[in-house]
Amino acid sequence: DVKVTQSSRYLVKRTGEKVFLECVQDMDHENMFWYRQDPGLGLRLIYFSYDVKMKEKGDIPEGYSVSREKKERFSLILESASTNQTSMYLCASIKGGKRSPLHFGNGTRLTVT
Amino acid sequence: SQQGEEDPQALSIQEGENATMNCSYKTSINNLQWYRQNSGRGLVHLILIRSNEREKHSGRLRVTLDTSKKSSSLLITASRAADTASYFCGLRTSYDKVIFGPGTSLSVIP
C-alpha cells in the first residue's frame, strides 16, 4: 500500500515564525498536493507539483510556498505564519495518468498563536 | 475557487437505510473520485469513475456520473453506523490537479 507520511500530527507555532510542513510518499508518485481543510470550506488546493522542482499554484497559494527537491518529498512552507493559517493541512500524492486515486497523509493540525 | 459542490451538506439517517449524496461541478474532468474522511483524518479513496463511464459499483457503493449535467451521485446502500463520516467528491481536471468541494457529513444512527 502507498504510504504518505506527514512529519507532524499537531504543530503549534507563533505568529511570524517560518513553518515547514513535510510530506513523504513511498510509491514513486509523480504528482503531489498540499490542501488545507477548514470547517464548511472542505479541502482547498494550495499548491501541487507534477515533477521534481516543478510547482503549480492552486486556488489559495498566498502566504505559502513549496519545495520539491526529490520526487518523494513535498514541503509546504509558511514564510511568516499568521493566525488565519491555523488549519488542518493535508498532503496527497497520485500516480501520473488518468486512472489513479489520491493517497492522503493523516494531516497536520497547525495552530498559529 | 472550489469547483465541486456536494449536497446535502449534512445527512442523518437510520442504520439500514440508503444514503445518497450528490456532487455538481463546473469544470471539465478526466475522472471523478469519491472519498471518505473519518474524524479529521486523511481522506480515503472509495471509488473512481472516468468521464466516459456512467455508473460504477463497489460493494455497497454505487456511483453515477452525468457529464451533460456535470453531476455525480454516491449511493450507500444498507448503511451502517461505521459509515458515519464526511464524504467528498474530487474532480481530476485536465491539468492533472484534483479539486474538492465542502463535502457531505453523514450520520448513521444505530
Image (cartoon, coloured by chain):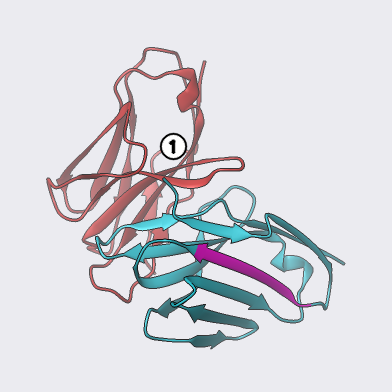
Q: Please report, as a chain letter, where disc 1 is located.
A: A
Q: Classify residue B28 as left or right of residue B42.
A: left
Neighbours of disc 1 within 10 Å: few (<14), some (14-19), many (20+): some
Across and down, in percent, residue B67 comes to 44, 77
Please tell me which residue is depicted at 56% across the width and 85% down the height of the picture. Answer: B58
Report if residue B81 lies within the magenta region. no
Mainly helix, strand or loop, the magenta region?
strand
> A8 or B57: which is nearer to us?
B57
- The image shows residue A59, relative to residue B9, as above or below, that is above
Q: Classify residue B9 as left or right of residue A106.
A: right
Please tell me which residue is depicted at 48% across the width and 48% down the height of the picture. Answer: A43
Residue B31 is drawn in which quadrant?
bottom left
Question: According to the rendering, which colour does chain B have?
Answer: cyan
Q: Residue furthest front?
A: B68
The residue type indicated by label 1 comes to Ser
- Numbered label tally: 1
> B30 or A21: which is nearer to us?
B30
Question: According to the rendering, which colour does chain A have?
Answer: red
Q: Classify residue A73 as left or right of residue B52.
A: left
- The image shows residue A50, relative to residue A42, as above or below, that is below
Residue B26 is drawn in which quadrant?
bottom left
Quadrant of the snapshot with the N terminus of chain B: top left
In the picture of the structure, the residue carrying the numbered disc 1 is A8
Across and down, in percent, residue A67 comes to 20, 38
Please tell me which residue is depicted at 58% across the width and 60% down the height of the picture. Answer: B6
What SS does tag 1 mark?
Answer: loop
Q: Magenta residues, as a range?
A: B18-24
- The image shows residue A67, relative to residue A63, as above or below, that is below
Report if residue B23 lies within the magenta region. yes
